[in-house]
Amino acid sequence: MDLYSRLIFLSCLLIAFFIDALKIFPPLQKMEAFYITRMVICIVAFFASLFLFIVTANLMGQLPLKIFELKQGEIASPTNDINLTAGLAVIVLVYYVVAGVIKKKHKFLLHEISFVGIISMLVEILELVTRPLTLALRLFGNILAGEILITALLGLIAWGLPLPIMFFEILVACVQALVFTMLTTVYIATAVNENH
């Protein structure tokens, strides 16, 4: 087994462990037959891990680590880099395309075989490209702008003026993670919706 297969196997074991741990509680045992399934827990785990990763990455930029000088670069928020936000957006893209193809099969992109259906498919493909692009650019731009603002204010007046902006950026970091996760939820919901 290669490293990737081992990581997938380990993550499945962890998810199975937490699902089995939920069975300890008697109220959850009664609800399990109706509401709690393995699929729902895996979906919630995906969204929760996405949200927590983005919040943690955003808040890392608010730590006062810029006072330490490095030989190269600086210690900043990982979401300050377009490569990380683009990678997260591609993960979301793959997730909602796979979910849509599993749910709708061949009708995910091509709803009907006609001229209008082909034009509709081209518009759907354009949406597939623009959704992750806007997710990545929104997160990247907001976090980068906040860090540039704080750095500029630290250069002007280092004692007090950046403090309210830093507290505001903590709120922005949480809101941006929430927006990214909520838009991911909407994209996946529209991909598996039967009426779409």
Image (cartoon, rainbow, N blue to C red):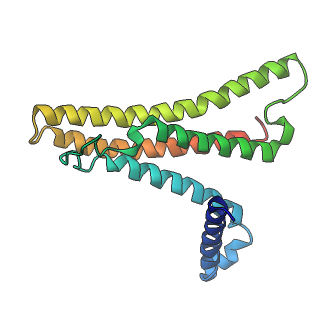
Q: Quadrant of residue 149?
A: top left
Residue 16 in the image: state x and y as whole percent.
65, 72
Residue 113 in the image: state x and y as whole percent.
91, 24
Quadrant that contains the N terminus: bottom right
Residue 104 in the image: state x and y as whole percent.
82, 42
Q: Residue at x 68, y 73 (%)?
A: 31
Residue 189 in the image: state x and y as whole percent.
67, 43
Q: Residue at x 22, y 39 (%)?
A: 165
Depth check, front residue: 10 or 182: 10
Depth check, front residue: 190 or 54: 54
Q: Residue at x 18, y 46 (%)?
A: 67
Q: Give the answer, above or below, for where 27 lies relative to 147.
A: below
Q: Give the answer, above or below, for where 14 lies relative to 142.
A: below
Q: Quadrant of residue 44?
A: bottom right
Taking 58 as reference, is 160 left or right? left
Taking 70 as reference, is 155 left or right? left
Q: Residue furthest right?
A: 113
Quadrant that contains the C terminus: top right
Q: Give the answer, above or below, for where 3 lies relative to 55.
A: below
Taking 73 as reference, is 128 left or right? right
Taking 77 as reference, is 136 left or right? right
Label tally: 0
Q: Residue at x 69, y 77 (%)?
A: 30
Q: Quadrant of residue 43?
A: bottom right
In this orientation, does residue 189 appear?
A: no
